[in-house]
Amino acid sequence: PEREVKVAAATGLLGFLGAFRRSFRLGLCGGFCLGLQPFHFLLCGMESSMGVILSIDERRGFIMKPFGKRVVMAVLCAATLTSPLLLSGCSMSELWQGTEQSRKEIAQRSEQDQVQLFNQYVKAVSRYNRMAVMFDYANTPTLNELKAGQHLTVFNAPNFKQLQKELEEAKQAGIPYDEMKEPLDKLLSKLNEITPVAEELDAYYKSKGYTTDNYAKEQQLGPKYVQLYEQFVPIYADFDNVMHKINTDRLQQRLQQLRDAGKKNAAAAQEVHLRLTAVLEKIDSEKQLDVNAINQELQSIGDVSNGITSPKYDSVKTSVNSTIGAIRTYMGSKQDNDYNRMIEAYNHYISNLNTTNMNELD
């Protein structure tokens, strides 16, 4: 069974994470639904996830790194600023010939359907990332030992089968955006290759088959698994990057909708989230940081957050300020422990944001 355990608190893993500066556990932000309240937790209350992949480093073997320049993917929410459309008593063609308001309502309904489909993929990827990194302390040694030609007695790997199942189920429900199709097909194709190999190796070691065949199957499947895994990593990253871009674009659109609707506090909260996340992306992706520029941006973000007048945002405001402080501390020290504290501060901010009802900020 899955355990909802913070990575930093997992037994023995804090030291492992501290050794690698690019290790993450970042939350999903889903607190920006302005639509039907019953869907708030369904669409927005997603569990935290970790957006990382394993990549090869000549000095340390496999280490954890973020997907490209991204450090977080926020859940896209179906936010409706007007009432949902009821289709009873009229055809779609009649509605399209109707008023401009009817056309807007149909488009809005279509967008809600896309968002709900998209969030199925987010859930699948989030679960895979969280569990893959939570058990990386076991998965990585397996991979490294197979690469080195060492004999195993236990096989550990990410849960490819569950990822495959959830992505196939999501695909059957629909693909919400055209740009997802090609990377999704490539990912499912690679999962079709690696999943049975991983399952066969797992069964082999559980049955102690190596005691009777002198590791013959290991020598046959071990190199194949390593090769497939190294092919899987960039394919998975490509799919996740496409999802992240779609999500970010839609969240930017949502910010403009909030502003247009006069939701000043909710719009400010959304702006803080997007800008603070962008700062973390910049810190992780750039080798030479412009510390002065980042400090100015952090000051501006803090001003926007502190300008939110609703008392229901106060706890989030406190965690924003704590995150800003942790970012500044890390930029000054460049120490692994401060890096982890920065990520934990951001996680706490996301946690507070996820429990905040954005409908009540204005």
Image (cartoon, rainbow, N blue to C red):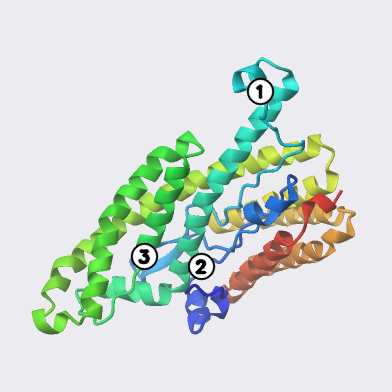
Residue 329, image x and y in percent?
A: 69, 69
Q: Looking at the rendering, which quadrant does residue 153 occupy? A: bottom left
Single out the mark in the foreground, 3 or 2. Answer: 2
Mark 3 highlights which residue? 57
Horizontal side of residue 43 vs 352, given as left or right: left
Q: Looking at the rendering, which quadrant does residue 318 occupy? A: bottom right
Q: Secondary structure at mark 1?
A: loop
Mark 1 neighbour density, 10 Å: few (under 14) some (14–19) many (20 or more):
few
Q: Residue at x 57, y 74 (%)?
A: 6
Horizontal side of residue 260 vs 252, given as left or right: right
Q: Is residue 38 visible?
A: yes
Q: Where residue 19 is drawn, which disc sits there?
A: none
- Say if mark 3 contacts mark 1, CB within 8 Å: no
Mark 2 highlights which residue? 23
Q: Is residue 290 visible?
A: no
Q: Where residue 90 is drawn, which disc sits there?
A: 1
Distance in Å between CA atoms under marks 3 and 2: 14 Å
Q: Residue furthest top?
A: 97
User: Tag 3: residue type?
Assistant: Asp
